[in-house]
Amino acid sequence: MAEDAKIFKYPFPYLYDESQEVARSFGAVCTPEFFLFKKDGRRPFELVYNGQFDDSRPSNNIRVTGRDLSLAIDNVLTGQPVSSIQKPRLLSVSLVLDAV
């Protein structure tokens, strides 16, 4: 992933969280889990979305779209409220944490 970040020139910082310390500090409960923050001038950063990428799973035939995260990003960029209904991915992150 770090190499991809360089090759594709990600316009955001990339972090490899080997110890899972960052995941724990954010309270991540599944993998992958997405955290979207906005900065509005009143406070440094506000968490506005914490949830899944979309409804696709390795075990279903739903196409990967990124719909849930994309909708949250679009709402932030257009000044609309982000839905309070935010679904986690349901793959326990404890499997990752226990494996480290």
Image (cartoon, helix red, strand yellow):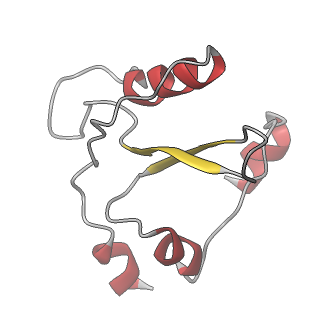
Q: Residue at x 82, y 36 (%)?
A: 11
Residue 33 vs 71, above or below: the answer is: below
Most extreme residue toward the front, as rendered? 42
Q: Where is residue 94 in the image (x, y as percent from the top left)?
A: 30, 76
Most extreme residue toward the top, as rendered? 78
Tell whether 63 sits left or right of 11. Answer: left
Res 51 quadrant in image: top left
- Depth check: give the residue in front, 64 or 89: 89
Res 93 quadrant in image: bottom left
Residue 88 vs 56, above or below: the answer is: below
Q: Which residue is drawn at 72% across and 37% down?
A: 40
Tell whether 32 sits left or right of 9. Answer: left
Residue 80 vs 26, above or below: the answer is: above
Res 59 quadrant in image: top left
Q: Residue at x 50, y 70 (%)?
A: 23
- Depth check: give the residue in front, 42 or 70: 42
Tell whether 20 sits left or right of 32. Answer: right
- Depth check: give the residue in front, 77 or 59: 77
Q: How many numbered markers are drawn?
A: 0
Quarter that holds the C terminus: bottom left
Q: Where is residue 46 in the image (x, y as percent from the top left)?
A: 61, 49
Most extreme residue toward the left, as rendered? 60
Q: Where is residue 9 in the image (x, y as percent from the top left)?
A: 84, 36
- Depth check: give the residue in front, 38 or 3: 38
Q: Position of residue 25 (x, y in %)?
A: 52, 76
Tell whether 8 sits left or right of 79. Answer: right
